[in-house]
Amino acid sequence: MKVFINGKLYDKQDAKISVWDHGFLYGDGVFEGIRVYNNAIFKLDEHLKRLYDSAKVIELKIPYSFEELKNHLINTVKINLEEEKIENAYIRLVVSRGEGDLGLDPRKCKEPSVIIIVDKIQLYPKEFYEKGLRLIISSYRRPSADILSPRIKSLNYLNNILAKIEANNANAQEAIMLNQQGYITECTADNIFIVKDEVVKTPPPFVGILEGITRQSVLEMCKELGIKSEEVIIDVKDLLTADEVFITGTGAEIVPIRQINNLEFHIGKITKKLIEYFPKFVQKHSTKVFVNV
């Protein structure tokens, strides 16, 4: 496995950054998780645009142009697919503030660190896609946007991790997080959807969510399949009285939900239809990496 760090490729065991990097010390940076399916990168431009948008908000200047970074990423993927003899992979693209001192001031940092990791991933065993996940409603609330905008995909995930620990302790696979007003936002690493009376619904960005690439893909898929969908405020009552519930994410893809707290849910026809259509949608929206595996 080869890891890209600041313009060079390193073997996995040699891929290192400084302990003075502010991404490590303070979570000061941004990242993207991107999937490779059948030698093609899914929605690459959309992921890169979100990365640059997140970096811009925190005044982090990525030391490559959009096209330069895109080319570095494609080349790193190509080398790893060939070396590992695989067709499917997960990309973790990280841009941190870079090496600085032990103070918070980002002005003390040198060049930002750009890291591209390509590896295999399987968040959930196959049976969960057939039988569904168990979720809890977390006691941890999402920070409001005036504290830290969830729309920035930053390296600071402690809020999500605390909710994930709560899910682990409850023997659940994920935790649903509410905002300060008590409305449904998202899970610790996934967006959430409900289906009610054959309408697919998901929380709008302003309630405090990351605008997931897979989330947007599901909304596009609904349009293509003639399924009515809407972004709408969802409260706990709406969630618990839904006909179907599913979550989406780059790593998770589309996963049905069978239980929230102690309430059972049916894995319905719309969720199954979206899961079945997803590979076809991916094929239409991917950037081919021309390799012979």
Image (cartoon, rainbow, N blue to C red):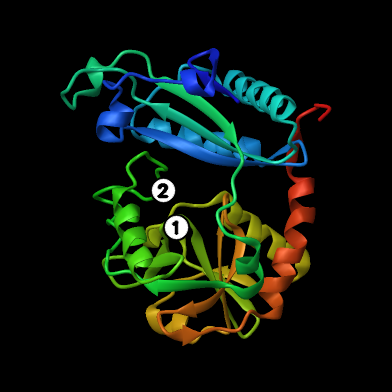
The disc label shown at residue 288, or none: none
Image position, residue 204 (x, y; %): 47, 63
Could you tell whether 282 is left or right of 191 in the image? Answer: right
Image quarter in which the C terminus is found: top right
Query: Which mark is first along the chain, 1 or 2?
Result: 2
- Mark 2 and 1 residues: CB-CB less than 8 Å, in contact? yes
The kind of secondary structure element at disc 1 is helix
Residue furthest to the front in view is: 13
Q: CA distance from mark 2 to mark 1?
A: 8 Å
Residue 137 visible to the viewer: yes
Helix, strand or loop at mark 2:
loop
Most foreground residue, 96 or 61: 96
Residue plotted at (62% across, 21% down): 67
Quadrant where the image shows the N terminus: top right
Q: Residue at x 42, y 37 (%)?
A: 54
Which quadrant would residue 156 be assigned to in this image? top left
For badge 1, the amino acid type reads: Pro
What residue sits 66% from the left and 28% below the top? 77
Q: Which residue is drawn at the image coordinates 27% and 17% (left, top)?
A: 109
The residue indicated by pointer 1 is: 205
Graded by Cα atoms within 10 Å as few (under 14), some (14 to 19) or many (20 or more), the crowding at tag 2 reads: some
Provide residue 80's location: percent of width, then percent of height.
67, 26
Of residues 63 and 290, the one drawn nearer to the viewer in this rendering: 290
Specify whether 124 is left or right of 238: right
Q: Position of residue 262 (x, y in %)?
A: 42, 84
Q: Amino acid at mark 2?
A: Arg
**Relative to 48, does residue 182 appear above or below in the rendering?**
below
User: Which residue corresponds to mark 2?
Assistant: 151
> Where does residue 183 sit, x and y in percent of width and height?
36, 72
- Is residue 172 or residue 44 the one in the foreground? 172
Farthest residue, direction right: 292
Question: Looking at the picture, does residue 220 appear above or below residue 58?
Answer: below
